[in-house]
Amino acid sequence: MQENRVRASKPNESSLVRARSRQMSGIIWQHREILAATTLVDIRTRFIGTVFGLAWTILYPLLFLGLYAIVYTMIYRVKVSGYDTVDYVLLIFCGLVPFIGFADALGTGVSCILSNKALVKNTIFPIELIPVKSVLASSVTMTVGIVMLLGVLWVRGIVHYTQLLIPVILVLQLIFTVGVIWLLSATNVFIPDLGQTISIIILFLMLVSPIGYTEEMIPPELRAFMFPNPLYYLIMLYRDAAYLGTVRPQLLAAFAAIALATWTVGGFTFRRLKPLFADHV
């Protein structure tokens, strides 16, 4: 009986994980003003010394998307039934814009703890915010790209009520990305080689994600291999809402579950490893 009472008094692992997740959310909300200020500093720092400055937030997505369009339409000469060249390019952009945001956050976020040694050893600044501000700063270009994309779609008469869901999808993407960066940045403190492989991982994700092709172009026998890729759900949600004017509840529910699970696991891992950071940076 006594042993059972002892077991009952101990919190199980799942409840501990949920408690840590709520604690991370509370830290972000409590220090939201510090987070906003440091994120703005990060954004300005990225463009210090450049000729165009903050204009790069517009020029970068334009150049990247333009090059991608040239490769697929003029070099690969991809033709999709039911789409002319412009529509096909816009379809690509619906998936490419969020991928740019995720890839940028992944590229800068993995090493954010090691590159902010002063903040890690600062006893006042909550280091849980370092990956969060890295993700938010990296998402500026993506946000500008989404606004530009919607502007072009509206000019071409592609207006759907489902486009109102894009902010919801964006929030889910940020939740998912922060969880990933919490997990990877904490791991990178102890395994610095992880940071050296990110460019390869980003290239791999670009190749296996449905950016340059539609869902109908995926052979039926290969579609099952798409389901383990979280970016599949993300890209399909953006494409459906922005361009096709549809929303598949099962995709939205699946990505929401993935985002919340990643946030929870990433936050739990970061909090557990945080006490060891100062000894390894």
Image: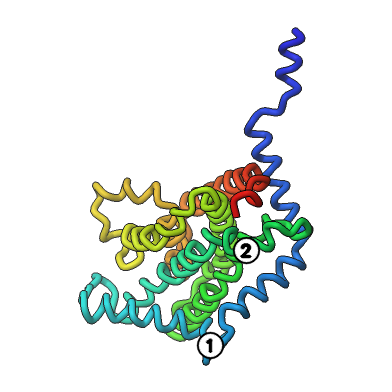
Q: Earlier in the sequence, mark 2 or mark 1?
A: 1
Disc 1 element:
loop
Taking depth in this image into account, of 213 and 204 the one nearest to the observer is 204
Is 183 left, or right, of 10 in this rendering?
Answer: left
C-alpha span from label 2 to label 1 = 22 Å
Number of the label disc, if any, that sits on residue 50: 1
Residue that mark 2 sits on: 116
The answer, for residue 59, to whether it is visible in the render is: yes
The answer, for residue 256, to whether it is visible in the render is: no
In this picture, is 276 found above or below 198?
above
Verify CB contact (< 8 Å) between mark 2 and mark 1. Answer: no
Give the residue at x 55% y 74%.
143
Is 145 left, or right, of 197 in this rendering?
Answer: right
Q: Circle 2: is it few (<14), some (14-19), or many (20+) Cα within 10 Å?
A: few
Q: Amino acid at mark 1?
A: Thr
In this picture, is 143 found above or below 16?
below
Number of the label disc, if any, that sits on residue 256: none
